[in-house]
Amino acid sequence: MTSSPRRIIILGATGTVGVRALQIIEESPVEWQICAVSAHSQGQQLGSLVSSSTAQYLTSSSSEHQSLIELLRTGDYDICLNAIVGAAGLPFSEAVLSAGCDLALANKESLVMAGAILMPLAAKNSATIVPVDSEHSAIFQCLNGEDAPIKQLFLTASGGALRDMPLDELASATPEQALAHPNWSMGPRITIDSATMMNKAFEIIEAHWLFGVDAAQITVLLHRQSVIHSMVEFIDGSVIAQLGPPDMGFPLHYALHYPTRQKSTLNGFDAGLFSELSLRQPEDARFPALALAHQAIEAGGDAGAVLNAADEIAVEAFLAGDISFADIAMLCEGALHNCCADSCDTIDDVLAADQRSREYCKKQLSFA
Ligand code: NDP
Ligand code: MG
């Protein structure tokens, strides 16, 4: 008996993660039908990236945005990969989960902003969120088949491009320096977020929602080699980790084929790369963004959306040369203290918080 092709929609197909996903699909032993792919500013590239005659090419122009949301709501596909960057990804994640379809989630911002809404929505509609973020994929794999309670999650962090810069020079680091990531090749936003560790702050919030653990049970460890992708300690004290070279191909391959494991051309073990692995505590003074994750989880409600929006504005301003590296975390902290509302029950409330935070940050920037 031949099985029918696995139907997929790829959002953000022109980005770093999207393009890597298309390579994984190309090499996959499973037969795929690409139903649709989306882009934002590089829509003209979609035809050369995906030659399938069944694929719809969509951009985020207002008419096509609506068609894409409607397509996602039909549920006429098996899995959607959300590889859009930023808050713009949230409405698409919501549409996939409302349709009861599985979501391979690279767009961590969806959970940072609206984990309290998306997790129950997925459970209600029997949809699975399979993380693509490498740390969360590692933890997801460590937890597969386990029902023992978690004692502690260990999220590893490379420390980003500025991890060795003397502390007194850090405040004035340039965009060029912050964009030179030592291990991973990624889009500009997440590369800057790695240097500030705001990316790890978002990943703490993402892990809190995905795995139902308190912030106090999540420990960040500096791991220069980006080989141990994360670890779980169970209540019996056993620690399980997932390892591999720093290549998004691995978590993408796992997420796209989940719940099965399929053959791939990737090589996981590398004696040279694995020969020296180090783990240590990050310094609080170097990475003030980490504390903001704990503040946002404690505040609850729309704090995640406020934090994410502030960081989007701050990173944009830093890349444009308008603010310093140190200003990024300061602007985000200011937004967290000034923009959170009391209640946040719907996606519209989340989007309102996003807007409020952006307006606050733009106003602060106009005084700068
Ligand atoms: P890129 O900047 O490389 O790509 C972003 C993608 O999103 C592009 O396809 C872009 O389209 C699209 N996009 C941008 N703005 C919008 C918008 N307003 N509406 C719709 N689509 C939009 O980002 P990455 O691939 O690096 O990251 C994507 C997501 O995956 C992020 O959430 C990131 O945090 C997460 N992630 C990335 C990792 C990595 O290794 N890169 C690792 C773990 C998580 P276009 O190019 O056409 O403008
Ligand atoms: Mg990650």
Image (tube, helix red, strand yellow):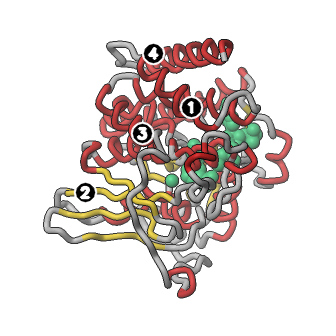
Which residue is rendered at x = 26% and y = 66% of the image?
145
The residue that mark 4 highlights is 339
Which residue is rendered at x = 43% and y = 30% of the image?
304
Q: Is residue 68 left or right of residue 114?
A: right
**Where's residue 164, x and y in %?**
58, 59
Mark 3 crowd level (few <14, some 14–19, many ≥20, 10 Å Cα): many
Label number found at residue 311: 1
The residue that mark 3 highlights is 100
Can residue 11 be seen here? The reply is: yes
**Dot placed on the residue nearer the N-terminal end, 4 or 3:** 3
**Dot placed on the residue nearer the N-terminal end, 2 or 4:** 2
Mark 4 crowd level (few <14, some 14–19, many ≥20, 10 Å Cα): many
Q: Alpha-carbon distance for marks 2 and 1?
A: 27 Å
Which residue is rendered at x = 66% and y = 34% of the image?
324
Mark 1 crowd level (few <14, some 14–19, many ≥20, 10 Å Cα): many
| 317 w.r.t. 164: above or below | above
